[in-house]
């Protein structure tokens, strides 16, 4: 999947873009901009189009809180995660909340369902309420989202990834490197015929990076990475893992280990192997990623990669607090990961 190229927004007059900046670029008055953005139906279509184009260029966000707040402080941090029913992202949100307890700030949480378009909508909606800062999952965003974030004038922290061109600060790890470490460990156990089970790479950019790490490790060991089953869903669930392991073994019956993009499809694959009369790991080994709680209680327990989901949240919140208190500038903080070899391999 090609890496998104950043599109830099047109510079405003200094600091976060204002309504006056939009008016200047669109060639209208600030009052006309205000009416247009509040849905005034009397604005001519060509004038509205110029205003909306200027808004996109600047990454301007209408401040709906300006008239009701005597202070510019809103008292909350915004965080956006891909899913609220994924225990790893729930742990990250819990880590943020726990770290914020030392302050008077609250957490406003939104979820994207793995859609960058939905993330863009959430960013705009949250910025209208003027949060103290914003914490994101991953480093890939739409050009408009990047423009809004770059011009927001607040700390922005991207997590769960190490983006090549971060918006501001980063708290995360390389998904590719972590998967590569897992494959190295499995090769060390004697496995050589690797399958890979993944969801929609277009939606799950972290899954895409894990696939890159999988391929990179196998090439380094002189092994084939062609045994791939892709389930066009995000997030990929337990039931998808059951479906995928059947397809994998139908196409490549001599596969000796199936690596899954997360622990959930890995658990589903193990359950399906049982239904098929296959013993894990004797007939085929299964590995996952993320060290969900289900990985340690599964029978057999699932070999996986622990990425400290809770710690990502606490470190992101602590970095946010330090930036807001001017004790730290934007930085890239690399979080740990650890391969957990268990009885499924």
Image (cartoon, helix red, strand yellow):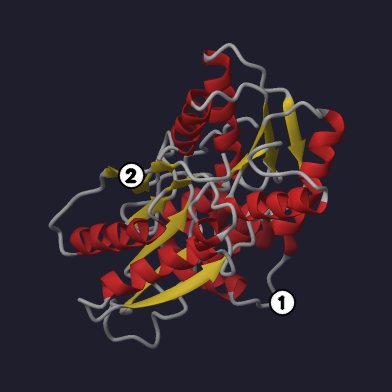
x and y percentages locating residue 78 in the rendered image: 42, 69
C-alpha separation, residue under disc 2 versus residue under disc 1: 53 Å
Residue 51, relative to residue 184: is it above or below? below
x and y percentages locating residue 117 in the rendered image: 64, 56
Q: Which image quarter is the N terminus in?
A: top right
The residue that appears at 64% across and 49% down in the rendered structure is: 266
x and y percentages locating residue 306 in the rendered image: 42, 49
x and y percentages locating residue 212 in the rendered image: 57, 29
Viewer-side residue, 237 vs 185:
185
The residue that appears at 42% across and 81% down in the rendered structure is: 65
Q: Which residue is mark 2?
A: 336
Count of marks placed on residues: 2
Viewer-side residue, 130 vs 97:
97
Which element is circle 2 on?
loop
Viewer-side residue, 50 vs 164:
164
Label 2, residues with CA under 10 Å away: few <14, some 14-19, many ≥20? some
Q: Which residue is mark 1?
A: 41
- Seen as rendered, the residue at the extreme right is 250
């Amino acid at each position: 999947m090609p890496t998104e190229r950043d599109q830099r927004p047109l510079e405003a007059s200094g600091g976060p873009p204002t309504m006056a900046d939009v008016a200047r670029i669109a060639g209208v008055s600030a009052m006309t901009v205000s009416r247009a953005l509040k849905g005034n139906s009397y604005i001519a279509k060509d004038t509205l189009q110029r205003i909306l184009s200027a808004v996109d260029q600047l990454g301007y966000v209408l401040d709906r809180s300006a008239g009701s707040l005597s202070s510019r402080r809103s008292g909350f941090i915004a965080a956006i995660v891909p899913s609220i029913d994924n225990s790893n992202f729930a742990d990250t949100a819990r880590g943020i909340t726990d770290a914020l307890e030392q302050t008077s700030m609250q957490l406003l949480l939104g979820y994207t369902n793995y859609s960058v378009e939905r993330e863009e909508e959430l960013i705009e909606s949250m910025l209208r309420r003027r949060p103290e800062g914003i914490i994101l999952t991953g480093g890939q965003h739409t050009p408009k989202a990047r423009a809004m974030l770059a011009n927001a004038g607040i700390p922005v922290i991207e997590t769960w990834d190490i983006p090549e061109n971060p918006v501001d600060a980063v708290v995360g790890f390389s998904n590719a490197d972590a998967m590569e470490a897992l494959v190295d460990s499995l090769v060390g156990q004697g496995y050589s015929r690797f399958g890979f089970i993944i969801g929609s790479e277009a939606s799950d950019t972290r899954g895409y990076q894990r696939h890159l790490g999988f391929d990179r490790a196998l090439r380094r060991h002189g092994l084939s990475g062609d045994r791939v089953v892709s389930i066009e869903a995000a997030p990929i669930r337990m039931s998808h893992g059951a479906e995928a392991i059947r397809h994998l073994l139908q196409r490549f019956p001599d596969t000796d280990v199936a690596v899954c993009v997360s622990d959930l499809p890995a658990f589903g694959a193990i359950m399906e192997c049982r239904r098929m009369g296959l013993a894990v790991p004797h007939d085929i080994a299964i590995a996952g990623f993320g060290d969900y709680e289900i990985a340690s209680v599964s029978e057999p327990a699932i070999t996986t990669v622990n990425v400290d989901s809770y710690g990502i949240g606490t470190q992101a919140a602590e970095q946010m607090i330090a930036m807001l208190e001017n004790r730290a500038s934007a930085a890239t903080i690399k979080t740990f990961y650890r391969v957990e070899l268990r009885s499924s391999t």
